[in-house]
Amino acid sequence: MVRKTWLSYIRKNLPEKDGINKLTEDNLAKINVLKQVENLKDHPIYKTYGQGVEIIGSLFHVASGELELLNRGGDELLNKLL
């Protein structure tokens, strides 16, 4: 399954911490989205031209059709997931 492949790559590259391998696939996906939001905010083009443009990280749940907004909690949510 493709999803397991990229999620296992994320898990493998997370910093070592007690229980890190016990993260669910859902939490790994959320961590990935939050990290990608950070990457976009650090990009030189965003820093030059993107001031005032909000980057919204979200996760679409196929089973329920719900869109979960993730970066409203910022670092607090990321720390909770880890």
Image: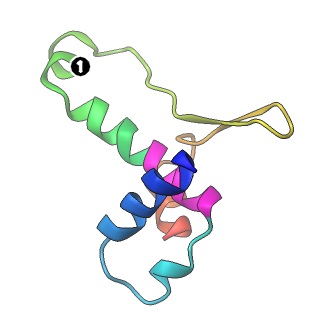
Main SS of the magenta part reads: helix
Q: Is residue 69 above or below residue 73?
A: above
Answer with left or right where residue 37 lies relative to residue 24: left
Residue at screen point 64% across, 57% down: 26
Which quadrant of the structure image shows residue 39?
top left
Q: Residue furthest right?
A: 64
Q: Residue furthest front?
A: 1
- The residue closer to the viewer here, 9 or 29, is 9
Q: Is residue 74 one of those drawn in magenta?
A: no
Q: Position of residue 52 (x, y in %)?
A: 36, 14
Q: Position of residue 60 (x, y in %)?
A: 68, 34
Report the magenta residues as a range.
25-33
Q: Is residue 27 one of those drawn in magenta?
A: yes
Mark 1 belongs to which amino acid?
Tyr
Q: Position of residue 64 (x, y in %)?
A: 86, 38
Answer with left or right where residue 49 lies relative to residue 34: left
Which quadrant of the structure image shows residue 54?
top left
Q: Which residue is mark 1?
A: 46
Answer with left or right where residue 47 lies relative to residue 66: left
Which quadrant of the structure image shows residue 4?
bottom right
Q: Residue furthest bottom?
A: 18
Q: Is residue 34 above or below residue 80?
A: above
Q: Is residue 65 above or below residue 18?
A: above
Residue at screen point 35% across, 69% down: 12
